Amino acid sequence: MSGRRGAAVGATVLVASAAVLAGSLAVARVALGRLGGGVAAHAEGGGAPAPEISSDQVLGGERVPAARLERGGALYDRYCAICHGEGGDGMGPSAPFLWPPPRDFRAAQFKFTGAPEGELPHDDELARVVRRGLAGTGMQPWDLPDQELGPILDYIKTFSPPERGFRDPYRKPARAEIPPDPYRDQAARQRARDEGERLYHAVFQCNSCHPSYVGPEALAGWGAAERPVAPLDPVPKWSATYRSVLLPPDFLRHELRSIATGGGARLDHDLVDLYRLVANGMNGPMPGYGHLDPAQVWAVVHYTKWLADQRGSEEGRALRRRLEDAWGAGGGGALRGRSPAGTR
Ligand code: HEC
Ligand code: HEC
């Protein structure tokens, strides 16, 4: 099996990486479709080998038939291996061109799937991430039917080493309940935003990693500590698990990766996705806040969404100018310049 699949990966590397870097999914998909049958030889020597699938396997507590994994493996090699690697180690042929790097599936660690800390992600959440893509990264949206995506997701689980990740007999995919949003009308949402602003800075201290969006006087008024260095800048942090410097987004500048801010009919969906992310955290880079009062978490979610919606607007630019004035030279330079080292 691995010979046939290796050929497909090698053939698509140049065309697909160029297309993906150009940001055009349509072009990438056409290139993959045309060359997916396999023409050139697979580059020798790189990356972990594809797992051998000869029998049914228990993955995430479910028995998965070998035929389904075979099918998932062939599709994975066609669509995903170019970045995530044939052996799921995140070292596919396109990986050197991508920042952040593609996920290493062997660790079974996911940032955006909203599983509570240390738990495995639910298939529905994996499917959401793959279908929506991760804005601003090499991970494009994949419009795949259930009959294809389901087997691909099961195949990804086979990369877990014995007794670990999806092969750990004591772990099952988990999905947290999302409590209903208590702030439903315009007036309630305005109140939630105001309360969320205080909670963000003074109670949850999201601004210990993300920027502050109020001046020093407001912080002092709440009795909140101010971050001594560059409070208007996000704090980048190296993560060995994700093999990358992770930069908490500045909501006024950076696109959120996993939360489409489509507006209109999608609005409530976005809020639910944002709640899930804040409640469960990101498995390493960011803690979860789901153990706290849901009304408070919802308030912070409304505030965060409001900030993210200001990105690129006149109101957002005015807020930024007020913050720079309020903090002066000690506030940090990045608001005026580019992101550190192109991490976002
Ligand atoms: C062009 C390169 C590329 C291709 C092709 C690609 N991915 Fe990704 N993928 C990435 C990158 C880069 C990330 C990491 C993004 C980040 O860390 O912010 C990622 C992350 C992921 C994640 C982790 C999400 C999380 O919550 O942490 C999953 C799951 C995933 N990809 C699945 C897939 C599947 C399934 C396919 C094939 C259908 C695929 N990817 C194809 C580049 C790619
Ligand atoms: C310990 C540092 C830390 C704290 C505290 C923290 N975050 Fe984060 N947050 C991060 C990092 C790092 C990322 C980016 C991870 C990545 O994309 O690789 C992030 C990403 C996010 C995202 C973007 C998700 C996406 O899809 O791109 C949101 C929204 C967010 N944080 C909200 C919050 C809120 C609200 C709080 C407080 C309740 C908070 N964070 C507290 C470190 C932190």
Image (spheres, rainbow, N blue to C red):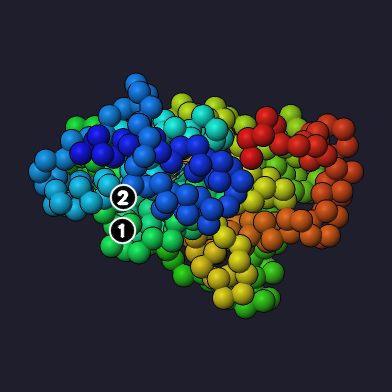
Residue 132 lies left or right of residue 254; in this view the side is: left
Q: Residue at 79%, 60% (x, y): give it.
A: 313
Label 1 packing within 10 angstroms: few (<14), some (14-19), many (20+): some
Q: Residue 302: in sight, yes or no?
A: yes
Decide: is 187 above or below 231.
Answer: below
- Quadrant showing the C terminus: top right
* Badge number at residue 148: 1
Residue placed most toward the observer, 172 or 16? 16
Secondary structure state at the residue bearing disc 2: helix
Q: Position of residue 105 (x, y in %)?
A: 35, 38
Q: Quadrant of residue 248?
A: top right
Given the current orientation, which residue lies at the most extreme left position? Answer: 55
Classify mark 2 as within 8 Å of ligand 1 or not, answering yes or no: yes
Identify the amino acid type marked 2: Leu
Q: Is residue 190 left or right of residue 327?
A: left
Q: Which residue is mark 2?
A: 75
Residue at x 67% of width, y 76% of height: 186
Q: Secondary structure at mark 1?
A: helix
Residue 166 coordinates in the image, percent (x, y): 25, 42
At horizontal 70% and vertical 42% (from top left) the residue drawn is 211
